[in-house]
Amino acid sequence: MQMDERKKKILRAIVQDYVDTAEPVGSRTIAKKFDLGISPATIRNEMSDMEDLGLIEQPHTSAGRIPSDAGYRYYVDWLMEKPRLSRKDKHIIEKETTKHIAEIQTIIANSSKILSDLTRLTSVVMGPNKGKSPFNQMHFLPYQPGQAIMVVVKENGAVENQIVDIGENVTAEDLQKIANVLNEKMRGRTMAQVKKDILRDIYNELARQRKLIDISLELLSDLLDNKKGSEELYLGGTINMLSQPEFQDVEKVKPLLQFL
């Protein structure tokens, strides 16, 4: 069974009306609202065919139809009109994306906010997997006496940081030298790829700070070989979901907000 032009128009009508109302869509509703030039009986026959195709489904007896996951997918791939961005929207995107931002987490968070602002919807953006990834670079930032923050950037763009006990006698110059050596010797490698001769070179160049090197390498091993592999979710405009018809009932939105 093929999706001819009439079926496509009816599916488009079902998706659009269900998104607007969050209520199952009947044949009479389609005939009245969308002026397709066909009778409710004909629409019912076409809806029956689309139900057989798995594009729509009936939530309960005597109800109208709602799009299935496959129906939404078909609509997005083949039926949804692609609106043009206005000059104002383009300017907002260009302004935000041309900022000099070092951390990929900030870029992703900003992208989620832009997407939400432009669509007036809640946006969900998935960040890079935080699992195993080669080392790119690291920096030490002074924190408080005897401590520094070790910032590690992975090849996949993820940024991790840990507070490190450095002792009272380690200077900012010492920390910079450690970072420079580790960046030179380890860039592009995982801890498993750091061979004995590389470790020997690192310890030879930083002999005075062996204890701090041991701590730094142990932390790097944990950060680079993270086996949890979790992706971070970035939300934008969470409050916007309250403007959707299916969430007019606060009790319905509570479980979703708790999940997010």
Image: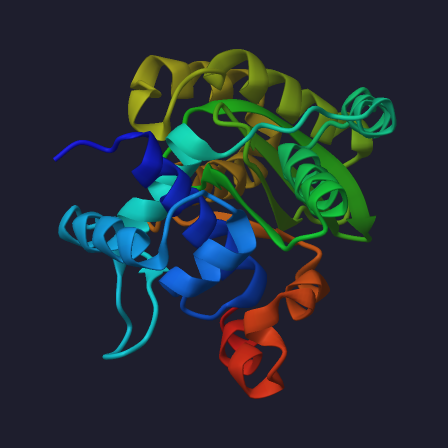
User: Which residue sits at x=39%, y=29%?
Assistant: 78
User: Which residue sits at x=56%, y=87%?
Assistant: 251
| As drawn, 3 above or below 181 | below
Query: Based on the displayed image, in which of its 4 quarters is residue 260 positioned?
Result: bottom right
In the image, taking residue 58 as reference, residue 164 lies left or right, namely: right
In the image, taking residue 88 as reference, residue 248 lies left or right, namely: left
| As drawn, 41 above or below 197 | below
Residue 225 appears anywhere in the view:
no
| As drawn, 9 above or below 65 | above
**Front-most of residues 118 and 248:** 248
| As drawn, 226 above or below 257 | above
**Front-most of residues 91 and 102:** 91
Residue 83 appears anywhere in the view:
yes
**Front-most of residues 231 and 29:** 29
**Front-most of residues 227 and 217:** 227
User: Which residue sits at x=33%, y=36%?
Assistant: 6
In the image, taking residue 71 as reference, residue 93 lies left or right, namely: right
Question: For the N terminus, which image quadrant?
Answer: top left
Q: Percent position (x, y) of residue 52?
A: 13, 51
